[in-house]
Amino acid sequence: MLRARTARVVRRFALLLAPILVASACAGTARAPDAQSPSAAAAPTSANALASDPPTSRPSPTEAQALELFGDLPTDSLDEAPAIAFQAALDAAVASGATDAIAAVVTAEGTWSGAAGIGGPNGRKATAQDEFAIASVTKTFTAALIMRLAEQGKIDLDAPLASYLGDLKVDANGASVRQALGMMAGLADDEQPAAADAIHVDAAHVWTREELVARYLPPEAAPGERFIYSSPTYALLGFAAENVTGTSFPAAMRAEVLDPVGATRIIAQGPEMKTPQPWALPIDRNLGVWAPEDMGVGGAISCISSATYGPGAGSMASDAPSLAAWAWHLFAGDVISESSLRLMTPSPPNREGFALEEMAGFGGPRAVGHAGNKTGYGTILVVFPTEQVVVVVLVNNPDFVVEPTVLALFEAAT
C-alpha cells in the first residue's frame, strides 16, 4: 500500500514511503484516458441519485456539518503586508530544506501566489505559473465529477459501481458508487513496488484500462466494512464517468468540472491533451530511479506512463493559483450543489468525506483537503471553511514537512 493511511491526518509528504513514491504515479491506478467504454447507454440512471439514504458509514446531508458557502471568487490581489508575509513563508521553506516552494492563497479579500527556490534542472527558478503534477489531489476532482453526474441523473450513488463499468472485466466487489467515493468499497490499493516498477519500465508507455485492471489485487474487505485508501477504487470511478458520458476521462473532466469555472490551466493529463508549460520539475536528488530526460515524456508530468497509470486517481496537473481558485469555486457551490458538497466534506466523527478529509497540524482551525505525491512532486490543498481561506503549497521534494508553511500562510491570511 503506497499511502500510509494510518497517519493520514499528518500532512507530511514523506508518508508515501519515499523509495516508492519516486517511481510511482500518486498511488494512482487507471487506464489510458483515450480508451472509451462502448456501453454508456446501458448504465442505469436515476433522477433521485442524491436523494436516497446513504449507508450508516456515511453522514447524510442533514447530518453533515453545516457549511456556509463561499462568495464569488475575489478578483483583487491581497494587500502588500500579507503578500510580504506569504513570500517570507516560502523563502523560509526553501531555507529549511525545500528545493522549491510554490503557493497560492485565496481569501474573501483577494488572492496571492508566489514561488521560491529552484523549480527545475540547471538552476531554473520556480514561478507561480509553473504547472505541477498534483497527484492524489486528482481524487477531489474525480469525486466532484461523479457528484455532478449524479446531479444530472446519470449516476445513482446507491447503484452498484459495476453497473456503470460497461463490459470492463473487473471485480468491483459489489460496492455502490457511494461506497467507492468514501473509500468503503473494500477494494485494495496498488501493489508496491510492482506498480512503481511497471510505471518506470517505459516513460512513454500509455496504459490501457484493460492492462491496469489486470493488475488489481483481490478485494480486502466486504463493501462498507472499513475504510481502505485505494487508488484503483477512484480509477474505477473515472471509468464510470467515461461510461456514462461516452467520452474520455480528460474530456468529461474538462466539460463538467473545469470549463464551467474557467479552469483552463488544470489538466486531466493524457495523450489527447498536452500539459501546458512552464513545468515545475524535480532536480536530480529528488528523482530516485528516474532520469531527468524522463520528465515530460509524452507531454505530461512527470511523464505519460505515470499520468496514464492514474486517471481518476493521480493524473492531473495544475498551477497553484488555478488549483486554489478551483477549490474556492468548489466551496462556493459553483462546481456542484451545496448538498453534494456537504456529502464530499467530512463531518465528525467521520474524518473522511468523498476525497476530502479532516486535516490536522494547523493550530486549531478546522481544515479539510487532500494531499498527493508522485515522482518528485508533493501537493497539498487545504481549505479552512470557517475562515474561508484556501491554501495550496507545491514542493518538488515530497519528503519536506509542509505543515509549518501552510500554517504560516494561513496565519498571514487571517
Image: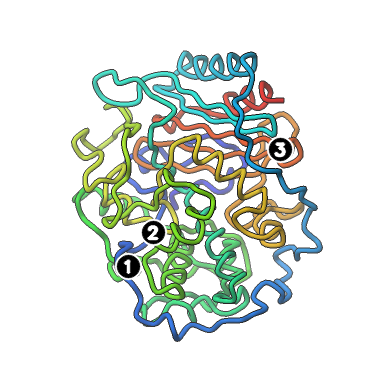
Tell me where residue 319 appears, x and y as whole percent.
44, 37
Q: On screen, 306 above or below 222?
A: above
Q: Of discs 1 and 2, which sits in the foreground?
A: 2
Q: Which mark is residue 388?
A: 3
Say what secondary structure mark 1 lies in. Answer: helix
In the rendered image, residue 195, in percent from the top left (x then y), is placed at 32, 54
Q: Kindly identify the residue that appears in the image at 28 percent across and 67 percent down.
A: 211
Reading the image, the residue beneath label 1 is 209
Instruction: Residue at 39% x, 51% y: name it.
Output: 315
Left or right of 355 in this view: 395: left
Which residue is at a point 28% across and 18% down the rendered structure image? Answer: 123
Q: Quadrant of residue 308?
A: bottom left
Residue 165 versus residue 193: which sits nearer the camera? Answer: 165
Image quadrant holding the C terminus, namely top right
Place of residue 350 in the rendered image (x, y in percent of width and height, measured from the top left): 72, 55
Question: In whole angstroms, how far apart are the C-alphas of marks 3 and 1?
Answer: 39 Å
Sequence-wise first label, 3 or 1: 1
How far from the left and from the top, in percent, is residue 171?
Answer: 43, 76
In front of the other: label 3 or label 1? 3
Q: Determine whether the residue tagged by mark 2 lies in a helix, strand or loop.
A: helix
In terms of image quadrants, where is residue 238?
bottom left
Please name the residue that numbered disc 2 is placed on. Answer: 250
| Distance Cα–Cα, label 2 vs label 3 | 29 Å
Tag 2 or tag 1, which sits nearer the N-term? 1
CA separation in Å, label 1 and label 2: 14 Å
Residue nearest the observer in this picture, 16 or 317: 317
